[in-house]
Amino acid sequence: MEESLLTIKGIGPSRVKQLNKLGVTNISSLLTYFPRAYEDRSATFLIGALKDGMVGATTGQVMRVQEKKPRRGLSILEIYITDGTGSLKVVLFNQGYKKNFYKLGQRLHVYGKVEFSYGALQMNTPHIEVLYEGQEPQGGIVPVYPLVEGISQYTIRNAIANWFSSHQEMEDILPAHVVQEHSFMPRYEAFKEMHLPTTVERHSLARKQLAYEELFVMQAGLLLLRSKEQAELGVKMGPNGKLYEQFLSQLPFKLTGDQQRAVLEITTDMENERPMRRLLQGDVGAGKTVVAALSLIKAVENGYQGALMAPTEILAQQHFESLQGLMKGLDINMALLTGSMKASERTIVYEGLADGSIDIVLGTHALIQDKVHFKKLALAIIDEQHRFGVEQRATLQKKGQNPHVLVMTATPIPRTMTLSIYGDLEVSLIKELPPGRKPVLTYAVDSSYKERLHVFFQKEMQAGHQVYVVCPLVEESEKLDLVAAEALYAELYDLYNKEFGVGLVHGRMPAADKEEIMNEFHCGRIKLLVSTTVIEVGVNVPNATIMCVEGAERFGLSQLHQLRGRVGRGEAQSYCVLISDSKNEETKTRLNVMTSTQDGFVIAEQDLLLRGSGQLFGLAQHGLPDLKLANILKDIDLLVLARQDAKEWLAQTGLAAGAKYMKPHLLGRFGPSFERIIYS
Ligand code: ADP
Ligand code: MG
């Protein structure tokens, strides 16, 4: 399958170059370059039965061919065909050179969209097949491939058809008994059905089978990874002790029921000799930090080190501060490690981690650099897991001897997603919010509300509260976005800086400047913060009561939910104002979801429905390959089935043999980083 494309009849170096543009570099990538759609040309209609707007095929005899040149550079070729029940005008643009190609009396089979214009039926640039004496139209179901400029459907169809005509079989990937059990067709047949479908039914069976295969490989990979991690013994910890009790007793609040349950699940895992692999899922503001803190305490009182890795400096810093607050007076040595720290400061942390004098470290990616060595890391916590890949998680784990692992996420992920993305991590769920939280009143408005909003900002700030104003900033239009954010900042600065203090943070600023502004906001010297989405994750300023989002149509629902979660963290009533001038119906639907619910799970589900799974939980982001055929949401039954089968198969075959068998397929799908994780 790694064979060169040149082995296909009719493919020379220039065709290869074209195919390369599609990412097709060898036979295997050609065969997995699946059509984006299919045209069913098998349904042939009489011309008299054609109707405006329908898409279909018909056959007729050429009655007249004429070329029109309404203006320079435009040629319209009109071919009239009839079958006795009516006549159809076939229109081709700028193909005057074909004028003599179509001859009177010749039979044509055409497929395309029918239009009724100026009292006559016509088809613009349909697919045309010339039928010679006694020839039947090829018709059938024809694949339509995603293309780029300069490459035709013909090129790819032809390459694929030629491969199939010179090959009669393909090696199976799935274990034989699985193929048998599900009555799958031979793999060769399935691929052929994808590219050269015979019937709708068989094609749909083929798609299902290949989607299953894709999921089977993926699940086998995740199961192998999991069992590799679990095969070795971890650190078995003792029951909760004095430090743990002391921490609980000085906590300024009582844990919610969900928090208590999560803590119990985690501490029970840690008392087991198998290393913990647990996902802590809790909506924004649900109180995951204190759960993490208790887990860290448990590691420390058992004589081990714990680490918490966060995706941004600001978040790491904030975790550091909140943990210091929560652990005040306890005999614990805590450190922060981030990339922006001075080299000399970092060296001190490296030493403390290596000699074991630091008990708990909070940090960013800086934690997984080569220089970092732990004396006895037994608990690795990863915050906002979706920002890290499988490989980064694995690297942190490798800093210890099979440490317990807790990953935390505020993005509510449906069960199907946790299965497919995280393998079978155990899941702890915090659904209940801490008591006293008032729902954030949410409004969707257009920019005509600006004046009124400014009055509102002023009123809240006069009452001592703080305001976020968030502007969209995306890479493609970064410069323009930045100008817009700066203009807005200048406007608000003029209005309010004297009285309240106004700041601006955006992704392009040096980390140190950003940090300074965030600190000013945190301690209240700045009351109004204009920002691009850098505050999206985790920032905790309970005194903030307004979250105002400019250009709200440009944010995903889950992003908006995260942003809204920045307010409503204190006693006071909070507000979220979504500003959008978009008239788009889908935008309105999305913003309606925000104004009608506060439930992160409902919002995530709506987001998935409205945007599809790929965008929200891009598998690549998680260090996994994107699936070509399977859809994690729609093919959930298939996923569960594939997972179950993969599990049984591994149990029968044994892990070592299973890993060996799957290796080429796993590396083909997951790439070299997976090899490092699983086969080293
Ligand atoms: P997240 O789950 O988003 O990380 P945090 O851990 O930052 O949430 O908690 C949000 C806020 O709620 C913090 O100010 C925290 O002190 C507070 N909090 C957490 N648990 C409780 C509780 N059981 N009762 C009252 N307040 C709590
Ligand atoms: Mg958090």
Image (cartoon, rainbow, N blue to C red):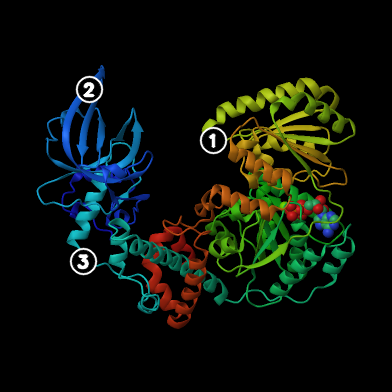
Vertical placement of residue 222 versus 196, above or below: below
- Location of mark 2 (residue): 68
Q: Badge 3: how crowded within 10 Å, few (<14), some, or many (20+)?
A: few
Which of disc 1 and disc 2 is earlier in sequence? 2
- Indicate the position of residue 48 as horizontal and vertical percent values: 28, 42
Which of disc 1 and disc 3 is earlier in sequence? 3
Distance Cα–Cα, label 3 vs label 1: 47 Å
Distance Cα–Cα, label 2 vs label 1: 47 Å
Q: Badge 1: how crowded within 10 Å, few (<14), some, or many (20+)?
A: few
Q: Residue 475: give its label.
A: 1
Distance Cα–Cα, label 3 vs label 2: 49 Å
In the displayed structure, does residue 173 sit left or right of residue 12?
right
| SS at circle 2 | strand
- Indicate the position of residue 565 as horizontal and vertical percent values: 74, 46
| SS at circle 3 | loop
Question: Pointers 2 and 1 in contact (CB under 8 A)?
Answer: no
Instruction: Name the residue type under label 1.
Output: Glu
Circle 3 or circle 2, nearest the eye: 2
In the displayed structure, does residue 320 sit left or right of residue 615?
right
Q: Quadrant of residue 581?
A: top right
Vertical placement of residue 5 versus 71, above or below: below
- Location of mark 3 (residue): 168
- Indicate the position of residue 448 as horizontal and vertical percent values: 72, 25
Q: Which residue is drawn at 16% across and 37% down?
A: 62
From this viewpoint, which residue is outermost toward the front? 85
Instruction: Name the residue type under label 2.
Output: Lys
Front residue (pair 653, 239): 653
